[in-house]
């Protein structure tokens, strides 16, 4: 089964049918205009979407000179379920939201909210529309990939890290002098990284004991 965007903002689920060569396809309507879709997941006949709208800061709205040079653009992220043509928002936040590119193995989305100082990690269930808090991390954590065995790989500031929500484990990969880690992925026994010096790239595999807890 594959779930994704249909190119026009709608959610599509495609899977093999019961007969040979048949395909089952389910579609949900497109998102509301002026919102940027971040992530989707599906449970039964219900789709979960996370969308973010970006607006001008209050200084920009006031028309102050050079206000566009200052930080502070406002965001509003909404967590919504779609069943048929009915949409229901069950959470709204002004924090900066980021969701991993694919759901966890149980269909839940892993999303983070950054408040300027700390990052809150939560799992969102598309079937029950519930948010389960997992962890609070110092600094800004951005999850990028999800492994088949439930590891979130991403970045905590400039450090490559991997987290496993089901066991509350976390690993940070040691960086080599003169290199920058550009990619990280974790599985049960191995953490893999790609590092770059700007001239060459190196792939490294670490056993679980080689990474920093």
Image (cartoon, rainbow, N blue to C red):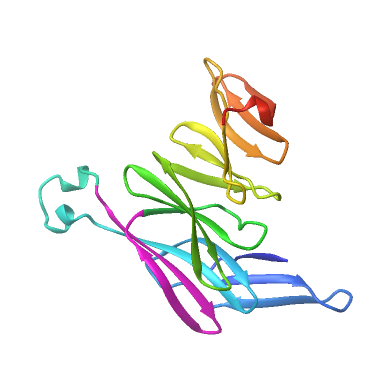
Question: Residue 92's spot in the image, x, y percent?
Answer: 37, 66
Image quadrant for the N terminus?
A: bottom right
- Report the front residue among 173 and 24: 173
Residue 188 location in percent, x, y? 71, 41
Q: Is 63 situated left or right of 152 in this image?
A: left
Q: In this view, does 189 lie above or below 206?
A: below
Residue 177 on image: x %, y %: 53, 15
Q: Tell whether 192 sits left or right of 39.
A: right
Residue 157 seen in this snapshot: yes
Relative image position of residue 151 (x, y in whole percent)? 63, 46
Q: In this view, does 7 lie to the left or right of 36?
A: right
Point out the residue furthest to the front here. 167
Q: In which quarter of the image is the C terminus?
A: top right
Residue 29 position (above or below residue 113): below
Considering the whole magenta stretch, tell me its main secondary structure: strand
Nearest the viewer among 76 and 107 is 107
- The residue sitting at the right extreme is 20
Q: In this view, does 156 lie above or below 16?
A: above
- Identify the residue at horizontal 64%, vertical 39% (top origin): 185
Name the residue at 16% across, 58% down: 61
Is residue 22 shown left or right of residue 200?
Answer: right
- For the record, the magenta segment spans 72-95
* Residue 6 in view here: no
Query: Residue, x 67% and y 33% (percent of image)?
Result: 191
102 inside magenta stretch: no
Is 78 one of the magenta-colored residues?
Answer: yes
């Amino acid at each position: 089964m594959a779930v994704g965007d249909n190119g026009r903002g709608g959610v599509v689920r495609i899977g093999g049918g019961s007969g040979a060569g048949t395909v089952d396809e389910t579609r949900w309507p497109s998102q509301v205009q002026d919102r940027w879709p971040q992530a989707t997941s599906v449970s039964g006949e219900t789709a979960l979407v996370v969308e973010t709208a970006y607006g001008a800061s209050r200084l920009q709205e006031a028309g102050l000179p050079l206000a566009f040079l200052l930080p502070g653009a406002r965001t509003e992220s909404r967590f919504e379920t779609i069943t048929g043509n009915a949409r229901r928002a069950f959470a709204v936040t002004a924090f900066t939201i980021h969701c991993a590119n694919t759901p966890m193995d149980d269909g839940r989305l892993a999303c983070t909210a950054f408040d300027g100082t700390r990052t809150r990690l939560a799992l969102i269930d598309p079937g029950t529309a519930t948010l389960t808090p997992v962890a609070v991390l110092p600094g800004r954590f951005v999850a990028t990939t999800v492994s088949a065995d439930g590891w979130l790989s991403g970045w905590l500031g400039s450090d490559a890290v991997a987290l496993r929500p089901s066991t509350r484990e976390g690993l940070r990969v040691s960086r080599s002098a003169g290199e920058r880690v550009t990619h990280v992925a974790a599985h049960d026994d191995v953490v893999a990284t790609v590092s770059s010096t700007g001239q060459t790239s190196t792939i490294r595999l670490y056993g679980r004991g080689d990474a920093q807890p």
